[in-house]
Amino acid sequence: MKNYTGTQEPGLLSTILHEAAHNLGPAHEYKVAGKKAGDVFGGPMASVFEELKAQTAALFLLEMLRKKGVISDELAAQSFTDSIVWAMGHISQGMYTATGERKAYSNLAAIQIGFLLDKGALTWDAKATAANGTDKGALIIHPGKVIPAVNEMMKVVARIKSRGDKKAADALAKKYVDGPRVPHTIISERFLRFPKASFVYSVRL
């Protein structure tokens, strides 16, 4: 947990890279065989993969910026860790709405965590003591495997988007969103112990 600072900078960096990546191809307006993403994947899945592309690029671009000296090694590690915590927060909110629609951020988060687990960049140790010193079970980041895993994930996601490979998109969702690879239940139980503040706004006309 040493790389999770709880400060704004690591998360803001990820957000900036995510939003910038929405403008990098293949973007939502691109067509495959004359069809837009919504027609190829279906609206909800198209949204998932556009957000997945952007967030995966946010991870991918960290190493490029680090190698060029734009950001420090420390900030790169902190931003990656912040993104993992962000992903688990969305996983804790469930994969589908009350009406059965996919939640884009929750789905992308599950796919990322599952992919990183499969590539060994993350491991789930059911016997490890969590950072709170009480719970059993912890998600462990393996820094030496992060960059190769993120590079491969970027290739997979970009290939699916650019080729309009609905079959591959559905397979990823089935494995990580609906399957048992990601510890959805434990993540939800841990995060939902700490309710977030809600804000109510009023407008005076």
Image (spheres, grey):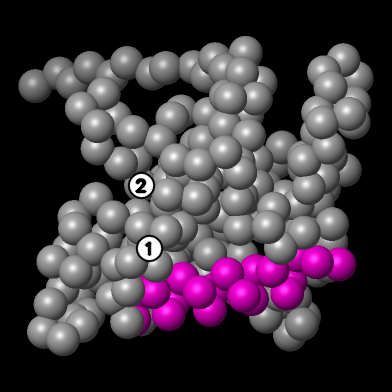
Is 152 part of what is drawn in magenta?
Answer: yes
x, y (%) of residue 93?
46, 28
Front-lying residue, 182 or 139: 182
Residue 91 vertical position relative to residue 136 in the rendered view, above or below: below
Helix, strand or loop at label 1? It is: helix
Quadrant for residue 140, please give it. top right
Q: How many marks?
A: 2
Q: Which residue is mark 2?
A: 104
96 relative position to 36: left or right:
right
89 relative position to 160: left or right:
right
Residue stretch rendered in magenta on the structure: 144-162
**Residue beneath the point at 9% across and 21% down:** 205
Residue 5 appearing in the image: no
x, y (%) of residue 3?
82, 48
**Residue beneath the point at 15% across and 73% down:** 36
Mark 2 or mark 1: name the one nearer the start of the chain: 2
143 relative position to 32: left or right:
right
Residue 34 vertical position relative to residue 16 in the rendered view, above or below: below
Quadrant for residue 37, please give it. bottom left
x, y (%) of residue 152?
62, 75
**Residue beneath the point at 75% across and 65% down:** 146
Residue 2 vertical position relative to residue 145 in the rendered view, above or below: above
The residue carrying pointer 2 sits among few (fewer than 14), some (14 to 19) or many (20 or more) residues within 10 Å by Cα, namely many
Q: Which residue is mark 1?
A: 169
Front-lying residue, 202 or 79: 79
**Residue beneath the point at 84% across and 22% down:** 136
Mark-to-mark CA distance, 2 and 1: 13 Å
Label 2 sits on what residue type? Ala
Label 1 sits on what residue type? Ala
94 relative position to 133: left or right:
left
x, y (%) of residue 44?
24, 50
SS assignment for the magenta stretch, majority: helix
